[in-house]
Image (cartoon, rainbow, N blue to C red):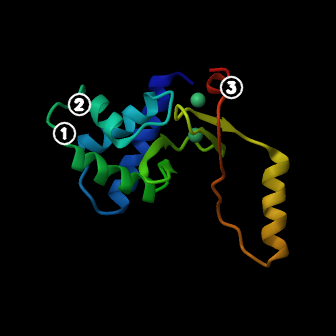
Amino acid sequence: MNAKKELELYIEELRTLVKKRGLKNSAQREQILQVLFLAKEHLTPEEIHQRVKKLNPSIGLATVYRTLSFLEKEHLVNSISFGNESKKYELNRGEHHDHMICLECGKILEFYDEELERLQEAIAQKASFKLLTHELILYGICPKCQSK
Ligand SMILES: [Zn+2]
Ligand SMILES: [Zn+2]
């Protein structure tokens, strides 16, 4: 599928959801989704704001924050928390993954490990805990920063 077609599908999904919630369509919401779709990395609300301003110069940071929390609540985007720093966001592309964060440069690496996924399910099951979702973040120093 080409990128344009893929973006249209995300926008379509958003419109359906907005309608279901009885909200009005907003170009701003779609522009923010587009920025996240095009991003190769995880972005802070400020970075998203910088990028979305190129599509819509009048959009404010407060709108970006509000829209991100809406999109996250609706599972269209995911966020990663950085201690007391701000969150970073990424589009939910439907493929679960976990993260490693470098404490020196802030770089985020993604990983997926089937065995680890299974292990978490087994741990929950043993505790009669109904697992719905999980977030796993490994904090450390990336190879580049180690070699400094
Ligand atoms: Zn680093
Ligand atoms: Zn990620």
Quadrant location, ligand no. 2 = top right
Spot the residue most to the front.
Answer: 148
Q: Which residue is mark 2?
A: 53
Q: Which residue is mark 3?
A: 143
Q: Residue at x 24, y 28 (%)?
A: 55
Q: Give the foreground label among 1 and 3.
A: 3
Q: Which image quarter holds the C terminus?
A: top right
CA separation in Å, label 2 and label 1: 6 Å
Lower sequence index among marks 2 and 1: 2
Check disc 1 and report its element: helix, strand or loop: loop
Q: Is residue 59 left or right of residue 91?
A: left
Check disc 2 and report its element: helix, strand or loop: loop
Q: Nearer the viewer, residue 1 or 32?
A: 32
Residue type at mark 2: give it. Lys
Q: Nearer the viewer, residue 46 or 4?
A: 46
For disc 1, does the CB lie below 8 Å from ligand 2?
no
Q: Position of residue 96 (x, y in %)?
A: 65, 46
Q: Dot 3: few (<14), some (14–19), or many (≥20) neighbours within 10 Å?
A: few
Instruction: Tell me if label 2 and label 1 are in contact, CB under 8 Å.
Output: yes
Quarter where residue 53 is shown: top left
Q: Which image quarter holds the N terminus?
A: top right
Q: Residue at x 53, y 21 (%)?
A: 2
Q: Dot 1: few (<14), some (14–19), or many (≥20) neighbours within 10 Å?
A: some
Q: Give the foreground label among 3 and 2.
A: 3
Q: Is residue 136 left or right of residue 73?
A: right
Residue type at mark 3: give it. Pro
Q: Which residue is mark 1?
A: 59
